[in-house]
Image (tube, rainbow, N blue to C red):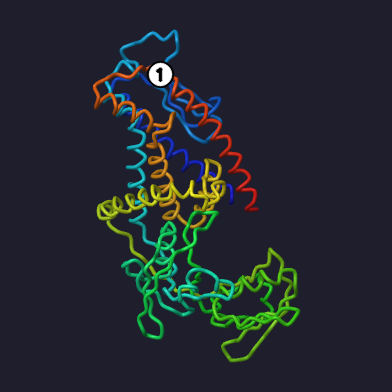
Amino acid sequence: MVIIYYIIAIIGFLTLVLVHEFGHFIFAKLAKIKVVRFSIGWGKPIWEKKVGDTTYQIGIFPFGGFCQMAGEQITDDYVPSEDDFYSKKPLPRLLAVAGGVLFSLLFGVLLIAIAGTMPTVEAFVAPQIYITEELESAPAYKAGLRSFDIITEINNKKIESFSDIQMIVGQAMGKELHIKVLRDGNPLEFKIIPDVERSTGRSIIGIYQYLPPVIDSISSNSVFKDLNLQKNDKLVYIIAENGDKVEVISTSDIPNFIENHLYENLEFVFLKTDNTYVSKKVFADKKFNLGFSFYVEKRKIDGLPFFKSLILAFPRSYETLSITIKSIPLLFSGKVNVGQSVAGPIKIIYLSSQVAKTGMKNILEFFALITLVLGLTNLLPIPATDGSYILFFLFELISRKKLNPKLISKIQSVGFFLLLILMIVVIINDIFSIGSLF
């Protein structure tokens, strides 16, 4: 079954590549620029077919693709032709290289729109917070927030659920947050400067969702199945071998206590619905699983009509691009671990396979994020990217002066070589990053 998710991930990733390269292809054809080779995947072809002037192929490595235009790379023995890349005026060349970016961005909008039409059943957790003892040194507690506070607004944005808190705080880029809460019915306001999580670049303030430890369902292989636990029973205490004891007020108390008492026999005490107590001692190692889930409210969200979803997809895409742009300086700030927070093709495929397990809507939104970021990063004016070509050809359009094609070609060749080295480093980093998850 797991292999299916990897197949979905690879097909999805290659679809994003196909759309991007097809954007180059379409605008090259419109500009009457000859396309020599159109490839999905890198390396030696496992399939190829020539149609007209173009050879279409599938490369052995499913990590990218290319649209090779005639005369794009100029050698010393280059003989110009009327359908070559540099035989065209700056605007057609500009459109041919910008077509990939345009198609990636529009495809991201389309994926978000399609996802928006799908009805879903989502978990709803109220915006009530819980702060464990381990988090008392974190920004939220230091600023004055306390367990059971209900967050109502962050930066003048109304908060409806705990997921709203996670989204707004996570995207704060370490900047000050203005938070309004209700405490025992009384409104309070706080200013909090979040920390930045080194592994992801997300901002965090040190809070958990408040979720009472009420059992919802028990699996057939749970270590507690002999206790005959039922829906609405509660986990109330966990007791360690040395007598340490935690009263389980919120579900976040559980992993913290277990983490502090790994490789011990822990006693779990439950309060059943008939007000009787049952308990059992079990050995807790890193693979320990409770074997039951806690109750979380589920809410059905209806899908939107396509055109309404499409209209809403544009501001959502803009917000994604804006956040991505703002996060770029974090990579050079020293606040994040670049190796952990940057993903190459292998890691993207792995993460896609994990998201695929959660449903069609989530995987569409994930691929939308990837293709939007792909389009944006290709705009960066770095040699060998679409952005560098765009910069050169914009200069030609504005100045009305033609740059030396051989010079551009040499700059791009050096950039491609450096980009290839970077890609190898990123792929190696992907392998080690994924390996650490197992």
Query: 275 or 384: which is nearer to us?
Result: 384
Left or right placement of residue 154 versus residue 135 in this view: left
Query: 26 or 75: which is nearer to us?
Result: 75
Query: 59 or 256: which is nearer to us?
Result: 256
Left or right placement of residue 81 versus residue 17 in this view: left
Q: Residue shown at 49%/49% (left/top)?
A: 333
Q: Which residue is mark 1?
A: 407
Can you say whether 57 is above or below 146 in the image? Answer: above
x and y percentages locating residue 43 in the rendered image: 55, 27
Left or right placement of residue 438 versus residue 45 in this view: right
**Furthest residue toward bottom:** 275
Q: Is residue 51 visible?
A: no
x and y percentages locating residue 232 in the rendered image: 54, 82
Q: Residue shown at 37%/85% (left/top)?
A: 185
Can you say whether 171 is above or below 37 in the image? Answer: below
x and y percentages locating residue 103 in the rendered image: 34, 38
Can you say whether 158 is above or below 18 in the image? Answer: below
Quarter of image, res 386: top left
- Number of disc labels: 1
> What secondary structure is marked by label 1?
helix
Q: Residue shown at 69%/73% (left/top)?
A: 223
Can you say whether 20 is above or below 140 in the image? Answer: above
Q: Is residue 420 visible?
A: yes
How many residues crowd mark 1 within 10 Å: few (<14), some (14–19), many (20+)?
Answer: few
Amino acid type, mark 1? Leu
